[in-house]
Image (tube, rainbow, N blue to C red):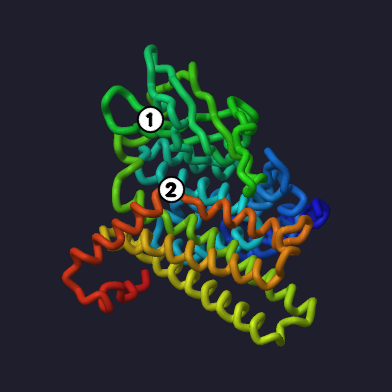
Amino acid sequence: MRRRCLQGIEAISALRQARPTSRVADPLELLRQCLPGIAAAAAAEDEDGAFPTSSLAALDEAGLLAAPLRRVLGGHGWGIEAAGAGPLAQALRLLGRASLPLGRLYEGHVNALRLMQRFGTPAQAAAAARDAAAGHLFAVWNTEAPGEPPLSIGPEARLLGRKVLCSGAGHATRALVTARDGDRPPQMLLLPLAPGERADLSVWTAQGMRASATGAMAFTGMPVEPEMHIGSPGDYLRQPDFSAGAWRFAAVHCGGAEAVLAALRDHLRRTGRGGDANQAARLGQAAIAAETARLWVEQAATRAEAPAPGAEAAAYANLARLAVERAALDILEAAQRSVGLAAFLRPNLLERLCRDLATYLRQPGPDRALAEGAAYLLAAEAEPGDLWHPPSAP
C-alpha cells in the first residue's frame, strides 16, 4: 500500500515538472492523481498514534499546502477568496473520501492560514505564506483540558497550561492556539514547534481517527514573543467567521459519507445482492442522503466565502453541518444494516470507514448550532421558503 502512495507522489512530481511552476498546475488535478495512493496509505496507517506522513508529502507536492493562500501570496485563494470556495469544497470532499484523518488535518491547516491572513499583519501573513510553501503543516488548537485552567500567558511572558484534542500533535510545526492574558478574551498565538515537541498522543483513545495523531500539547514554560500575537483578543471567536467556517469540516464529513456509500455499492455488486428490493431501497436512500449533504456543503461554502458574509452565512453553515451529520448517520446505518456483521470486522473497508466517520462527526456544540440556526429563521422577515435563495455566483 505504501508503494502505491509513493507511486502517486511520483506521478504528481512528474506533472509538476511538466509545467513552468506549481502555481500553473491545477491543484485539484494534482490531488486527484494521488487519491488512490492516499486511500491505500489510510488503510495501512490505521494505528493508534499514527500520522499520514507520505500522504501529507503528497499534498505538499500537489501544492495543496500553499493553495489556501491569497493569490498575491502565491496560492489559489482556497478558503480566503470567494473564487476559492468551490475548489476548496471539492478538495475537502475528495480528501474525506480517501482519508478522513488526512482530511481533518488539512481542514485545520486551511483554517489556520485563513486566520493568519485575516487577522495577522502583512508581515505575519507573508511569513506564513513562506512557511506553507516550504511544507510546514499549520494547525488550530483551541480546546482546553477539562477541569484545568485554560492555556494562559503567565509571568515573564511564558505560557502556562496545555491544549487537548490537538490533531497533528507532534507533527504540525506551526500551531495557532488561543491563550488567556488576564481577563481579556482569548488571544491567538502562532507557535513554531519542532517535530515531536511537547506532544502526548496516549490520551487519544477514541475508536476512530487513529491516524490523525490527535493528543495533548503541553506548553508550560514556552516563551511568548510579541510577533507571535495574531490579531486582537477575541478575534478567534469573531462572527460570522467562527460559525460560518463549520462548512469546511462538514465538507470532509460529506466526503467520508460518500466513501461509505461507494463501499456499500461495491459490496452489493460483489455479492450480487443489489437486485434485492430491500438492499436497493437502502442504497437509493443512502444516495439521496449523500447528494443532500453535497448540496448543503456547496451552498454553505459559497455563502461563507462571499466577500462580506453576514449572519445569514453563519446560520446557513450551522444548519448545513447538522444536515450533513444527519445524512452521514443515515448512510452509516444503511451500510451497516445492508452488510451486516462483516461491516464491523477488520479488515473490512467499511469497518474503518464507519469507525472514522462516526468519530469525526462528533463536533462540539451541535445543539447550540441548531438553536442559532433556528433563531435566525425565527427573526427573519422573509418567508421560510424564500429565505435560502442561492446567492449570486462570485
Q: Is residue 391 left or right of residue 285?
A: left
Which x, y percent locates residue 183?
A: 26, 25
Q: Is residue 216 left or right of residue 53?
A: left
For image coordinates 37% across by 61% down, the residue present is 317
What secondary structure is marked by label 1? strand
For image coordinates 38% across by 30% down, the residue present is 229
Q: Which residue is mark 2?
A: 364
What secondary structure is marked by label 2? loop
Q: Are marks 1 and 2 in contact (CB under 8 Å)?
A: no
Q: Which residue is mark 1?
A: 229
The reply to whether residue 25 is visible in this rendering is: no
Q: Which amino acid type corresponds to the residue marked 1 in the rendered image?
A: His
Q: Quadrant of the N terminus?
A: bottom right
For image coordinates 39% across by 62% down, the residue present is 82
Q: Quadrant of the C terminus?
A: bottom left
Which x, y percent locates residue 238?
A: 30, 45
Residue farthest top in this picture: 156
Which x, y percent locates residue 180?
A: 35, 27
Residue 358 vertical placement versus 323 (above, below): above
Between 359 and 234, the one lying in front of the other is 359
